[in-house]
Image: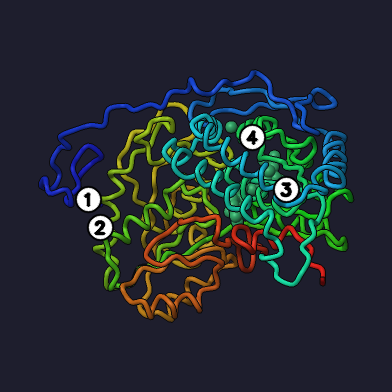
């Protein structure tokens, strides 16, 4: 471990090892005023905000302060059935009968409104989820809008997307999403479904329902016909009731592999279409010829972006043995500059963990890493007194058999492994039940191409990490799920192709 603490300059800054940092960041809090929080949010069914049939509510909190933000209506099975009926009526009636060019106008309108209200969405998303404002502002909300722009473009061009075939909507889509990118996951699900002429019933995660409910307001503002989008917050059983209902034709789930398996089992034997976007344990592979400073930025972005609560996070660093020492040295230097704290502060890099439950899971796995003999490194940094925070963590001396090398931690925790040859890197990278993403860092184009062919991962980034674009398909191999979201592949998952 280096001999300097958090208020000392890292060697790489050229100030002399261990010098006091000569300046501090001033607080730069984003104002919350743009968000008008309601005391109570209803369900969104058939174009209207309604209470749950049993008047039940649950609370959502701000994980950075542990304060309650609002009461949210908790859908009952009867409410879900009502939402499915509304979606069915809209699909068979207004929405299903609209020509693609008319559907496109609604999607363009939604995209525009998301952009116009982007600051409101970003602040609300940060308050409800704990992610830093610079991420919700610069990544989540712009990308969510981009998905609506992109799929709006396809709505009247389905015959070009699927030449020689007739693309028909599947019908009513049941969509269940997680808490790590609440609005973005909603956009990944709703935009292609609507573009292809389907209607949807969506269940947001229970810790982050608010951006979905603000999206309901966008649907009203865009004059979307009633029933095309329905939003039913509620617990896990409500998600299960929704996906297993005989009234839905398509199931789209993003979340953990365990729940994905339950859902697949529940709908086995039906003719429902299904896509599952599940967990991951991605390898980020750094070769000795890579530009190390760039690789360090990519490693940091890969695992500490969104507190590491990213399905495709680069949680296993595979470093070639000859460069592991300088690489780790640079990484430790860089870690000392990461700012952990108030997610609404514009300078914050790592915000709050989404829930107490998730914080406990991370804490438990990190303790297991220490108990199994890996070496733990955490930069000195003050954590806020309240809220669910966790220090950026780096484990060296990790064996493939360690839990921290095998299990998805879903937190800001990086496990470093080493390799000597490209074959060993491939073998170690693929030695996981998951297969969602991977990263390769090397100056050699030929090596990138050869690695990409051998890595069993849905997405492989080369000399970058965590890049997303609506035109590019995303999805997994093995226990990371099946089906693709994004791009034309994402559209394909919402259509039935018939011969002309
Ligand atoms: P989770 O427990 O599977 O929850 C995801 C969603 O499913 C939530 O809305 C949850 O509702 C609901 N749910 C939970 N149990 C259910 C059940 N038995 N039947 C139906 N629905 C159920 O996942 P998580 O722990 O919140 O999210 C993290 C996981 O998501 C990680 O494994 C991560 O890798 C994965 N993920 C994957 C992708 C991808 O694109 N591949 C993207 C993001 C996240 P409640 O909130 O009410 O429990
Ligand atoms: Mg919350």
Q: Earlier in the sequence, mark 1 or mark 2?
A: 1
Q: Quadrant of residue 298?
A: bottom left
Residue projecting furthest to the top: 39
In the rendered image, which residue does mark 2 sit on? 329
- Between residue 189 and residue 457, name the one nearer to us: 189
Q: Earlier in the sequence, mark 1 or mark 3?
A: 1
- How many other residues sit within 10 Å of disc 1, few (<14), some (14-19) or many (≥20)? few
Residue shown at the point (78%, 65%) measured from the top left: 166
- How many other residues sit within 10 Å of disc 2, few (<14), some (14-19) or many (≥20)? some
* Alpha carbons under labels 1 and 2: distance apart: 9 Å
* Alpha carbons under labels 3 and 2: distance apart: 44 Å
Q: Specify the label residue 215 is tagged with.
A: 4
Question: Could you say where residue 342 lies in the image, as x and y percent from the top left?
Answer: 41, 30
In the rendered image, which residue does mark 1 sit on? 2
Disc 2 vs disc 4: which is toward the camera? Answer: 4
Q: Secondary structure at mark 1?
A: loop
Question: Could you say where residue 443 lies in the image, as x and y percent from the top left?
Answer: 31, 73
Q: Earlier in the sequence, mark 1 or mark 4?
A: 1
Q: Secondary structure at mark 2?
A: helix
Residue 486 in the image: above or below residue 440 = above
- Asked if the residue at label 3 sits under 8 Å from ligand 1, the reply is no
* Alpha carbons under labels 3 and 4: distance apart: 15 Å
Residue shown at the point (68%, 21%) measured from the top left: 40
* Alpha carbons under labels 1 and 3: distance apart: 48 Å
Q: Are marks 1 and 2 in contact (CB under 8 Å)?
A: yes
Question: Could you say where residue 369 lies in the image, as x and y percent from the top left?
Answer: 46, 55
* Alpha carbons under labels 2 and 4: distance apart: 44 Å
Question: Could you say where residue 321 lies in the image, as x and y percent from the top left?
Answer: 31, 72
Q: Earlier in the sequence, mark 2 or mark 4?
A: 4
- Asked if the residue at label 2 sits under 8 Å from ligand 1, the reply is no
């Amino acid at each position: 471990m280096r001999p300097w603490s958090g208020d000392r300059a890292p060697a790489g800054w050229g100030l002399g090892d261990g010098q006091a940092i000569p300046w501090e960041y001033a607080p730069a809090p984003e104002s919350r005023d743009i968000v008008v929080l309601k005391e109570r949010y209803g369900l969104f069914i058939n174009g209207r905000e309604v209470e749950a049939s049993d008047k039940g509510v649950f609370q959502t909190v701000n994980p950075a302060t542990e304060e309650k933000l609002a009461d949210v209506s908790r859908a009952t099975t009867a409410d879900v059935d009502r939402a499915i009926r509304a979606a069915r009526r809209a699909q068979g009636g207004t929405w299903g009968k609209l020509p693609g060019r008319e559907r496109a106008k609604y999607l363009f309108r939604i995209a525009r409104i998301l952009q116009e209200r982007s600051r409101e969405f970003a602040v609300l998303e940060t308050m409800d989820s704990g992610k830093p404002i610079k991420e919700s502002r610069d990544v989540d909300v712009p990308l969510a809008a981009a998905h609506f722009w992109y799929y709006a473009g396809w709505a009247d061009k389905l015959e070009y997307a699927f030449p020689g075939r007739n693309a028909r909507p599947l019908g009513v889509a049941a969509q269940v999403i997680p808490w790590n990118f609440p609005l973005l996951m909603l956009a990944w699900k709703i935009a292609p479904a609507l573009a292809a002429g389907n209607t949807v019933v969506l269940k947001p995660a229970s810790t982050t329902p608010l951006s979905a409910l603000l999206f309901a307001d966008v649907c009203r503002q865009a004059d979307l016909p009633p029933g095309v989008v329905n939003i039913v917050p509620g617990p896990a059983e409500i998600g299960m009731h929704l996906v297993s209902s005989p009234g839905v034709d398509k199931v789209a789930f993003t979340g953990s592999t365990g729940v994905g398996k339950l859902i697949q089992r529940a709908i086995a034997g039906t003719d429902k279409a299904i896509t599952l976007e599940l967990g991951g344990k991605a390898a980020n592979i750094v070769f000795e010829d890579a530009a190390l400073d760039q690789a360090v930025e990519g490693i940091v972005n890969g695992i500490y972006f969104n507190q590491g609560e990213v399905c495709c996070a680069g949680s296993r660093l595979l470093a070639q043995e000859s460069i592991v020492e300088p690489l780790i040295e640079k990484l430790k230097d860089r870690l000392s500059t990461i700012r952990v704290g108030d997610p609404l502060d514009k300078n914050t890099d790592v915000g709050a963990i989404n829930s107490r439950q998730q914080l406990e899971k991370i804490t438990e796995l990190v303790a297991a890493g220490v108990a199994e003999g890996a070496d733990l490194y955490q930069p000195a940094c003050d954590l806020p007194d309240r809220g669910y925070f966790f220090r950026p963590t780096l484990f060296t001396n990790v064996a493939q058999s360690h839990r921290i090398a095998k299990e998805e931690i879903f937190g800001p925790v990086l496990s470093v492994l080493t390799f000597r040859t490209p074959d060993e890197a491939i073998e170690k990278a693929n030695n996981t039940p998951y297969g969602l993403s991977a990263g390769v860092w090397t100056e050699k184009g030929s090596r990138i191409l050869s690695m990409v062919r051998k890595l069993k991962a849905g997405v492989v980034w080369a000399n970058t990490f965590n890049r997303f674009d609506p035109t590019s398909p995303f999805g997994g191999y093995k226990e990371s799920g099946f089906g693709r979201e994004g791009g034309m592949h994402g559209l394909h998952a919402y259509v039935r192709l018939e011969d002309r």
